[in-house]
Amino acid sequence: MSTPEISVVIPVYNEEAGLQNLFDRLYPALDALGAAYEVLFVNDGSRDRSAALLREQFERRPDVTRAILLAANAGQHMAIMAGFEHARGQIIVTLDADLQNPPEEIGKLIAKMREGHDYVGSIRRKRQDSLFRTWASKAMNRLREKITRIKITDQGNMLRAYSRSVVDAINSCKEVSTFIPALAYTFARHPTEVVVEHEERAAGESKYSLYSLIRLNFDLMTGFSLVPLQWFSMLGILVSLGSAALFLLLIARRLILGPEAEGLFTLFALAFFLIGLTLFGIGLLGEYVGRVYQQVRHRPRYLIEAVLEKTE
Ligand code: UDP
Ligand code: MG
């Protein structure tokens, strides 16, 4: 395999049910592009037969297939990082393994890249996910727009293309918790977006529970902005000013009206509200501190068990 023009990086975690479908559609779509390509699967520590299926596919198409087998689950974005470090193409495309991103759309991204863009994002024309997912993801999208400088219309979609220079920049980052499309955006100089189709998951289930989705969104918010912390400082200032005003008011009432002892429940309501706010603030601080802690330990971000590739 001489250096290909296009590398397609696909993270795979427990996708045995859908992999054959993916192979059946991906390779014809890429062959049709008429460019030299490689497909780089990253098995993210799957506990099902995914690794065996990838090995079979590698044996079937060793000329254009490579597979990195991670020793343990490192998460989708770290798996893509591992893929990026091994990708050899000038244009690097990321894609989900579950066929929610139709492989036939890759051509659109490549065409845009050839026009000179170094980052091509994609917007799902009609998203095929549960109502809750779609709604929650829209809300997070809006929040991200407010607190970071990253301009991505549809952040949840992984069908994207990056130039060699953007991927090299990403490879020089050693962060342990990240969000690839956002990280890439910070290095892109001529980003653009195209509208693509979106399909329902072909087989298997989403690998993201509500909990892991929340964690992923914290990675995005904390990884690209300090604004949440600053909002809390501002809120603290406002609450202090408010309580100073309340204190003055109570003093005045004490002097004019004499002693008063009503309003116990108002006091409770106020106290609970402020305790809630404080706990949220501490939690938020913890999200940052915890990530700093993970980062300073310098543990390897992922362990590679094997790389399947044709040696020249
Ligand atoms: N994935 C992964 N490691 C993980 C979770 C997911 O490599 O820990 C892969 C998964 O196999 C798929 C992609 O990331 O190729 C997106 O996952 P999924 O489709 O479950 O996410 P959703 O579409 O529900 O956001
Ligand atoms: Mg999916």
Image: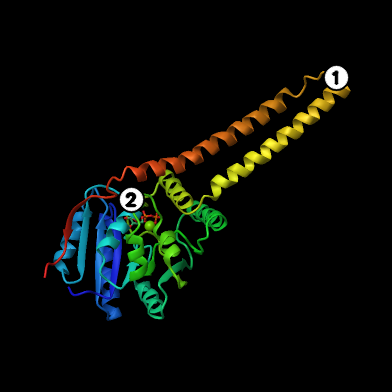
Q: What residue type is labelled 1?
A: Gly
* Residue neighbourhood size for the residue with mark 2, other residues' Cα within 10 Å, grouped as few (<14), some (14–19), many (≥20): many
Residue holding disc 1: 258
Q: Nearer the viewer, residue 108 or 125?
A: 108
* Residue neighbourhood size for the residue with mark 1, other residues' Cα within 10 Å, grouped as few (<14), some (14–19), many (≥20): few
Q: Residue at the location (47% across, 49% down)?
A: 222
The residue tagged with tag 2: helix, strand or loop? loop
Decide: marks 2, 1 in contact (CB < 8 A)? no
The residue tagged with tag 1: helix, strand or loop? loop
Residue holding disc 2: 75
Give the distance between the C-alpha atoms of the residues marked 2 and 1, in whole angstroms: 63 Å
Q: Nearer the viewer, mark 2 or mark 1?
A: 1
Q: In this view, does 278 lie to the left or right of 171?
A: right
Q: Where does the N terminus fall, quadrant-wise?
A: bottom left
Q: Is residue 168 left or right of residue 224?
A: left
Q: Which of 166 and 47 is in front in this view?
A: 166
Q: Residue at the location (30% across, 64% down)?
A: 9
| 242 is higher (above) or lower (below) than 207 | above
Answer with the quarter of the image where residue 91 lies: bottom left
Answer with the quarter of the image where residue 310 lies: bottom left
Q: Which amino acid does label 2 sit on?
A: Gly
Q: Residue at the location (44% across, 58% down)?
A: 156
Is any part of residue 94 visible from this angle?
no
Answer with the quarter of the image where residue 252 lies: top right
